[in-house]
Image (spheres, rainbow, N blue to C red):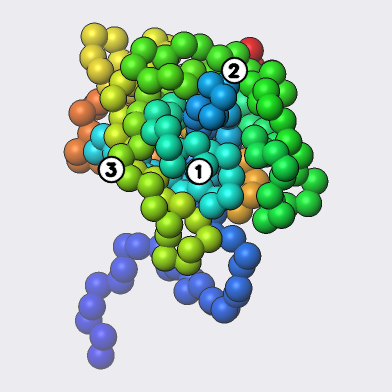
Amino acid sequence: MNTAPPSTQPAQSVATHQEIDPCILYFGTPVVLLSTENHDGSFNLAPISSAWALGRTVVIGLGREGQTAYNLGSRPDLVISLPTPAQWSAVEQLAPLTGRNPVPSSKPKGCRFEPDKFAAAGLISEPSHLVRPPRVAECPIQLEARAERVQLDASGDFVIVEAVVCKVHADARIVVPGTDHIDPAAWSPLIYNFRHYFGLGPELGHSYRTQTPRNFKGPTAEPALADAAPN
């Protein structure tokens, strides 16, 4: 006889998995715009979907033959600007452009050379404080950084960059007043999810390590800047 008390948890169905072979593994990563310096002193701007932070270091994955990897091999200054979900169309306008001329054969079909990517995407450059490449003025978060290590990945097809952030700029509307903390309810990054663009959904909760506690009582409204139109 089973005397165990009935479970108070709702029954959950077990997922049925199947083996697949996807061509990419972008399972929801933030999009960043990288500003770097070209050999002639002009600047390149490129959308990147492989970037993550560890302390003050941002690790970035780049195509081996792209202009950004070429630039960082000899000019380590860069700016990492984070767009909002509302700026996805500007990001997509940059996607088929390259700063390499002639266009490398490894680039996807339809990729074309563009020397002024800021203008092509309708974005405004803003001078940096500590590095030469400019910031993207419309992006709420901008990280000035220097590439401390640039090397090939294990496959040899990509370049891994370890960039140390030396200055952070943030839109005052997403900063907790009187602190150096980003308000997670006011900021939403642009997410690249299997080559589709998304924003964050409502907050579900927070980590025990957070330094920005709030009177959270359930899902919140969409982040304040998520629906703001790009300039």
- The residue singled out by tag 3 in the image is 54
Is 54 located above or below residue 42 in the figure?
A: below
Task: Give the residue at x 42% y 32%.
Answer: 75
Residue situated in front as seen by the camera: 112 or 201? 112
Q: Amino acid at mark 3?
A: Leu
113 left or right of 140 in image: right
Q: Are marks 1 and 2 in contact (CB under 8 Å)?
A: no
Of the residues shown, which amino acid type is indicated by label 2? Ala
Location of residue 125 in the rendering, given as x and y in whole percent from the top left corner = 56, 14
Q: Is residue 131 visible?
A: yes
Asked if the residue at tag 3 contacts the one at tag 2, i.e. Cβ–Cβ closer than 8 Å, the answer is no
Element assignment for label 3: strand
Q: Earlier along the polypeptide chain: callout 3 or callout 1?
A: 3
Residue under pointer 1: 69
- Seen in the image, is 219 located left or right of residue 94? left
Quarter of the image for the C terminus: give it.
top right
Relative to residue 73, is residue 47 drawn left or right?
Answer: right
Q: Nearer the viewer, residue 1 or 118?
A: 118
Q: Which of the 4 image quadrants contains residue 142?
A: top left
| Mark number displayed over residue 228 | 2
Q: CA distance from mark 1 to mark 2?
A: 32 Å
In percent of width and height, residue 59 lies at: 37, 45
**Mark 2: secondary structure:** loop
Q: At x 76% / y 39%, what residue is drawn?
A: 112
Please, what is the three-letter code of the amino acid marked with disc 1? Ala
